[in-house]
Image: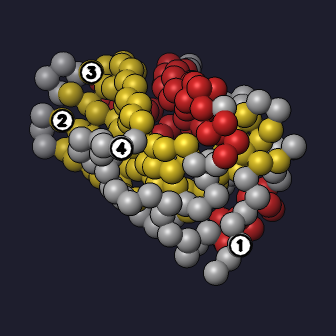
Amino acid sequence: MSATPTVFHLFLPALPDADAAIRAAEQAPFSYAPVGGTRGDLPEGFDHDVQRTVLGHGPETWDRALAALRGWKQFELPWVRFYRPDTPIRPGEVVAFSSRQGGLWALNLCRIVDVGEQSDGAVTRFAFAYGTLAGHVVSGEERFELTWNHATDEVSFEIRKFSRLQHWVVRTFAPVARRLQSKFSRDALANLQRVVEAP
């Protein structure tokens, strides 16, 4: 069994470090039980966070939002580094990202759980979720979902997650850790909005 990668770093982990962590995690199990739990009602026994924004209206907004989400643009934040944004969005792919938490950088690993697309004339939807692997500072799952309601022409973006604080550092500073989790959702929603609205 591969060793669990180091979670916290004084400096932003370099791409080779992230690649090594991804390779080591390819066979790692999920660090939580209800895999796929963001598909419906979020499971009990975890903290929940659901945030949503309206990105705009119409097919152009949808196309731009879909391209942005497929390109992992929601992670392009000053305090987050997403490695390998060319990673295809398909079940089984392992992704790595670092986030700055206080004076440290946390390197986190997740695996894509499922990808769903729907277009039935009333609603067009694209969504995918990833779940945490060993070494992540929390355990749980996060889903990114775009919805185009054809009745209203509204295009929306929702992030929903359930989690437990895992690493002793984040458990020690639980209120700060929860604020950072919520901040990621807010910042990711806002960043996708900026990408969609960019000239």
Q: Reading the chain from its start, which is encountered first: label 4 or label 3?
A: 4
Amino acid at dot 1: Ala
Considering only order in the chain, which callout, 1 or 2, is on the residue closer to the N terminus? 1
Q: Identify residue type, mark 4.
A: Gly
Q: In the rendering, which numbered label is found on residue 123?
A: 2
Task: Kindly identify the amino acid type of the residue bearing the numbered disc 2.
Answer: Val
Q: Which residue is mark 3?
A: 154
Residue 163 x/y as whole percent = 46, 43
Q: Is residue 192 visible?
A: no
Judged left or right of residue 87, residue 40 is left
Camera-side residue of 135 and 196: 135
Q: Residue furthest bottom?
A: 1
For mark 1, give the secondary structure: loop
On screen, residue 152 above or below 93: above
**Which residue lies under the disc numbered 4?**
45
Distance between the Cα atoms at labels 4 and 3?
A: 33 Å
Spatial separation of the CA atoms under disc 2 and disc 3? 10 Å
Secondary structure beneath disc 4? loop
Q: Nearer the viewer, mark 4 or mark 3?
A: 4
